[in-house]
Structures are given as C-alpha cells and as structure tokens.
Image (tube, grey):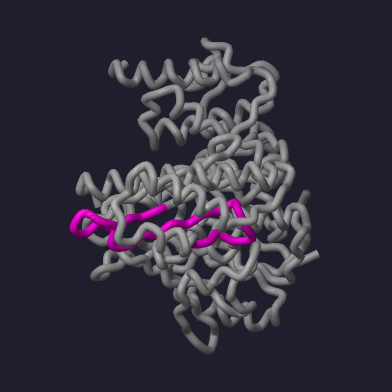
Amino acid sequence: MSKTRDIAVTVNGSVHRAAVEPRLLLADFLRHTIGLTGTHVGCEHGVCGACTVLVDGDSVRSCLMLAVQTDGRRVETVESLGRLGQMNALQESFHAHHALQCGFCTPGMLMTATDLLRKYPLATDDQIRQGLSGNLCRCTGYEHIVTAIRALVAAKGDGR
Amino acid sequence: MKPPAFDYIVADSVEMAAAALAAAGGDGKIIAGGQSLMPMLNFRLLRPSVLVDINRIDGLAFIDEAGNTIRIGALTRHFALETSPVVARHLPVLSCAMTHVAHLAIRNRGTIGGSLAHADPAAELPMLALLLDAELRIASSSSRRTIAARDFFLGAMTVDLAADEILTEVVVPKLPAKTGWGFEELARRHGDFALAAAASTLTVSDGVIAQARLALMGVGATALRATEVEALLVGQVLGPNLTARVVDAVRAAIEPETDLHASSDYRRHLAGVLAGRVVAAAWRRANEGAA
C-alpha cells in the first residue's frame, strides 16, 4: 500500500479534508470517504457516464479521475442540484417528463445535462442526443430524457 | 476495477516531470487527462510504479498563432481545441474532427498530447496530426527534439517516445489560402471510436489541385496518409470520374483487419466511400474560397 496524501477538496460548497491513497478514484472518495452516494458507479472505465460530476464546473467521469487530483479543486455532485421539495429546474423537468425509471443513470444524466446546457445551444434533438451519447440508460429509451432537456431549452429561450 | 497501487508525483514543470520519469527507470507513466490511462489502470492492463501528474504544470495548455503555424500545448484539452476561434479560423478541419471525439465529459479532460502519445488506431487526433503535417516537440531530462507526425506513429499504441520523454507541444501549419477540407467518420454511436474515418485538404491554384492531402483511419494499425491517392489528385480538376478513381484507389491501397466491429471488406468499402466524400467536400470548399 502506497503512502497516503492529505487533500482538501471543496465538495458542494463544503471543504472536505482527508488522507487518501493516490489510487483512490474520485467516485469512491465521494461515495465511501465522504458518504455522498448520489454519484453512481456503473462501469468503472468511462463508458456508462453514471458517475459524471463537475470539477471546477466541467463535467468529468469520476471513475477516470483520482481523488488526489482534486486537491484544491471544486467538485459538484448531484446532491448540489436540489433536494426533495426544492428541486432545481432541470430536476423538475426530469420529474415532469418522466425522464427516469430505475434512476441509476439519473445522477450522471443530470450532471451531464447541466454542463451541456451551459456549453451548447442544444437547438435540435440531434444535438441533445449527441450530448447524451456518453450516458447509458437501460430503461427509458432516452425519449423522455431528451424531452425533459428540450423543454428546459425551450423555457430558457422564452426568457422564463 | 480499481487501479493498482503506485507512487504519485505532482510535477510543477516539464523538467521535474522528465526527471521523475528518468528516476522511475522506464516504469513511470505520465498522467495528463487520463481518459485512456485511467481505464487501463482500472483494468490493471498497466501497473506503473510511478504516476507523474502533469496537470498542474503552468504553460503547457495553450493555442497560439506563430507565423504560419498554430502552436498547441500538449495539455490543451479537447474541448479547448473544439471551441478555439484560432483553430476554427486556421484549422477548421480540426475543429470539425474534435466534435467527433468521445463525449463532453471526456473532451473536458482529454488532452492533445495524451491522445497523440497514446496513439489509439481509431482516434481522430493522430489522423489529423498526419493529415496536417504536424510537428511534435518532445523533451527529456537531457535533451529536446522535434519529430514529424509521419515519423512518430510506429504501430497501434506505439510511438517514437522513450520512457523518459514527454510530448510538450504540437506545431501545426495553418491551412494555405484557397484550401478546402473535408472530414467524415462513421461510428456506431456518436462519440464512439470510429469504424473508419477520412480527412482531406485540397489546395487549388489556377483551377486545378496544387496540393492534396488524404488521411484515413480505422483501416490499419495506425492512421495513414494515402500518398498514392494524393498523387492522383495533383494537377487535376475534381469531377465524378476522378472521385470514383479516388474511391477505387483507396480501396486498393488498404488492407483493413476484421474485428468484432466490422469485417475487412466492410471497412475497405467504407473507407472508399468516406474518402470520396471528403475529397468532394474539400474541392467544393476550396472553390467557394473557404479557407
């Protein structure tokens, strides 16, 4: 076992200090070290997108990043978006359009969509689908997820 | 599905990273974006004793105009290349290709240096480096050198880079005036590794093709330049007959492997179709005056 490193990471606005092995994945740090189990772990090799979080505002696969690399950085997980009774607009749209069934992919879908909505116009369904192409969902057939994001893009366009 | 244990060094300069690699005696690995390395660690396909993290080196991520070239720092993220106005203006074929690279979360982390050094046979950036006659700058603890992209890629995931060397910069000549370009890729799902892809630039002078470049990938152990097909194009006006000859010549020039994803025959057919499309698109853009 290699020696541990002391890191300080800002997760959802709170600073977390921990001594971690360099090989600890960011996903495991979030889930096991600090107990934020909203981030789901599917494939552990960057294919399924379930573990997507934001690091310094950019979406990343937390299974393809080491916890030690986030020392001094800002991480946002699905828990940062909202809570029951206080969901954000993206979560409300997923709820309104039935954009989830089992919910396993949902945290990754929400964090990916958060970054997509900031970076791309998402003017067409094709663009939305391309943006989601790195996130696997085995229940919905994606149709309602696309609908939920399209509705949010349209609402933004209306200035609401 | 967890990485093996390794020592971890955060380098704050290229010199420090090179020294750490040299000290590791061939058993060190650089981690940049980690989007290919981390899966290999998670699968334990690799067990480096030392991981040298270059993400915190200042001045290794940049896109600069320098005379007739664009200089790109090795740590430049795919998303920065995709959205760079400098790249869009002078290397539009690269901007287009970047939209096909994986998915946003991968493009946010992955780097040009990492993609070139990893040299996956189905990755876009090695093909673009070959197409655009890029030069790669490489540093070690004792020396610096420059190598042409055409000499850098030796085989699948094999490049001319010693265990103590770091790729630091990619220098890409701007597209000349009156140059059109084309890029086409076929993947089963957007962002997946390509079954095959093709890219071309054609420079037109006095109504005929003065310089032709055609690169292919997914048809061999590395991306390649179809030089014999390029020779067919020089001095010519592109029309349906010549495009058909390009398609046939590409199919004759390659010997793709059969794998789980596609047969050799299908890849040969596909490469021809894509090559025909990219030279046609390049010709059209060159004659529209689009750079």
Q: From what the image shows, is residue B291 above or below residue A89?
A: below
Q: Is residue A74 left or right of residue A42?
A: left
Q: Is residue B73 left or right of residue A138?
A: left
- The residue located at (62%, 52%) in the rendering is A65
Residue A13 image position (x, y, % from top left)? 50, 40
Extreme bottom residue here?
A: B142
* Residue A75 belongs to the span the image colors magenta: no
Nearest the eye: A127 or B152: B152
Q: Which residues are magenta?
A: B200-225
- The residue located at (36%, 44%) in the rendering is B280
Q: From what the image shows, is residue B207 above or below residue A140?
A: below
Q: Is residue B123 left or right of residue B289?
A: right
Q: From what the image shows, is residue A78 above or below residue B180?
A: above
Q: Could one spot residue A39 in this view of the protein? A: yes
* Residue B203 belongs to the span the image colors magenta: yes
Extreme right residue here?
A: A1
Q: Main secondary structure of the magenta part?
A: strand
Nearest the eye: A113 or A54: A113
Nearest the eye: B167 or B284: B284
Residue A11 image position (x, y, % from top left)? 55, 43
Count of numbered marks: 0
Can you tell which quarter of the image residue B241 is in?
A: top left
Residue A148 image position (x, y, % from top left)? 49, 17
- The residue located at (21%, 44%) in the rendering is B288
Can you tell which quarter of the image residue B64 is in?
A: bottom left
Residue B162 image position (x, y, % from top left)? 61, 79
Can you tell which quarter of the image residue A153 is in?
A: top left
Q: Could one spot residue A86 in this view of the protein? A: no
Nearest the eye: A21 or B232: B232
